[in-house]
Image (spheres, rainbow, N blue to C red):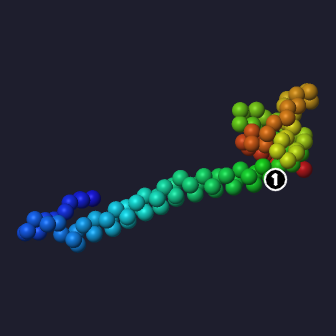
Amino acid sequence: MNSFILLTADGSASAGTAGGLGFSYIISIVLMLAVFYFFMIKPQKKEQKRVEAMLQDMEVGDVVVTTSGFYGVLIDITEDDVIVEFGSNKNCRIPMRKSAISQVEKAEK
């Protein structure tokens, strides 16, 4: 974008050109904010809603994957926490936050 001011014959700046430059700056800032919103904020909100829905739909018996990559089965769910059973020996039960779950696979009925 060329940003220069035309000088008239008497050496003063042209008033029409200076006003046009201010308007173009405002338009460019509005466009940058719109691009920022549609490429950064909106996808993040969409992902956050997807994760919230996934955590709300969890049931006892579902297979989960934790953020650290461990597979386990849900055996109890409370308000903020879950108890996950790891392995097949039924002795490794670990309480953890719901936010530590990255994927949920529904149990077959």
Q: Residue, x 64% and y 56% (percent of image)?
A: 46
Q: Position of residue 91 (x, y in %)?
A: 92, 27
Counting from the top left corner in percent of width and height, residue 17 is at 22, 69
Q: Nearer the viewer, residue 44 or 11?
A: 11
| Label 1: which secondary element | loop
The quarter in which the N terminus is drawn is: bottom left
**Quarter where residue 99 is shown:** top right
* Drawn side of residue 89 relative to residue 53, left or right: right
Residue carrying label 1: 57
> Does residue 81 appear anywhere in the picture?
yes
User: In this rendering, would 31 be left or right of 43?
Assistant: left
Q: Is residue 12 above or below residue 100?
A: below
Q: What residue is rendered at 43% in x and 58% in y?
A: 32
Q: Position of residue 28 (x, y in %)?
A: 37, 61
The quarter holding residue 25 reads bottom left
Outermost residue on the right side: it is 90
Q: Residue at x 92, y 30 (%)?
A: 90
The answer to which quarter of the image holds residue 62 is top right
User: Residue 80: horizontal and vertical position, in percent?
Assistant: 82, 45
* Position of 45 relative to 18 (above/below): above
| Of residues 56 and 14, the one drawn nearer to the viewer in this rendering | 14
Q: Is residue 61 visible?
A: no
